[in-house]
Amino acid sequence: MYTPDFFFRTWTVEAKGKFTAKDRKRVCALLSANPRPMKFAMLFQRDNKLSKSSTTRYSEWCEKQGIPWAVGWFKGEWLT
């Protein structure tokens, strides 16, 4: 069972320091398995590259997936 890190009034936020391939698969599975629209976002400690050999950053991966993201702190809209 998967439990995201933070639940706000209308948003669910997952926080990550290191965002591994396993984590990315888990996030995709969570979003595809959810039958209703879900306000889901990612919060990162840093906007690192996906791996040493990748040029894609965590933020770019989220944008390709249509997932809102932030680095360092929650966006104000997530708290409402």
Image (spheres, rainbow, N blue to C red):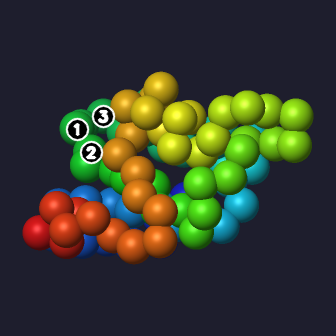
Is residue 53 shown to the viewer in this render?
yes
List x then y, in percent, for residue 37. 22, 38
Spatial CA distance of label 3 from label 2 is 9 Å
In the image, 73 versus 2, the foreground residue is 73
Is residue 3 shown to the viewer in this render?
no
List x then y, in percent, for residue 11. 25, 60
**Callout 3: few (<14), some (14-19), or many (20+) C-alpha neighbours within 10 Å?**
few
In percent of the image, x 19 and y 68: which residue is there? 76
Count of number-bearing discs: 3
Q: Are marks 3 and 1 in contact (CB under 8 Å)?
A: no
**Callout 1: few (<14), some (14-19), or many (20+) C-alpha neighbours within 10 Å?**
few
List x then y, in percent, for residue 77. 16, 62
Residue 37: mark in rendering = 1
Secondary structure under tag 3 reads loop
Q: Are marks 2 and 1 in contact (CB under 8 Å)?
A: yes
In percent of the image, x 59 and y 54: which residue is there? 47
Which numbered mark, 3 or 2, is in the foreground of this view? 2
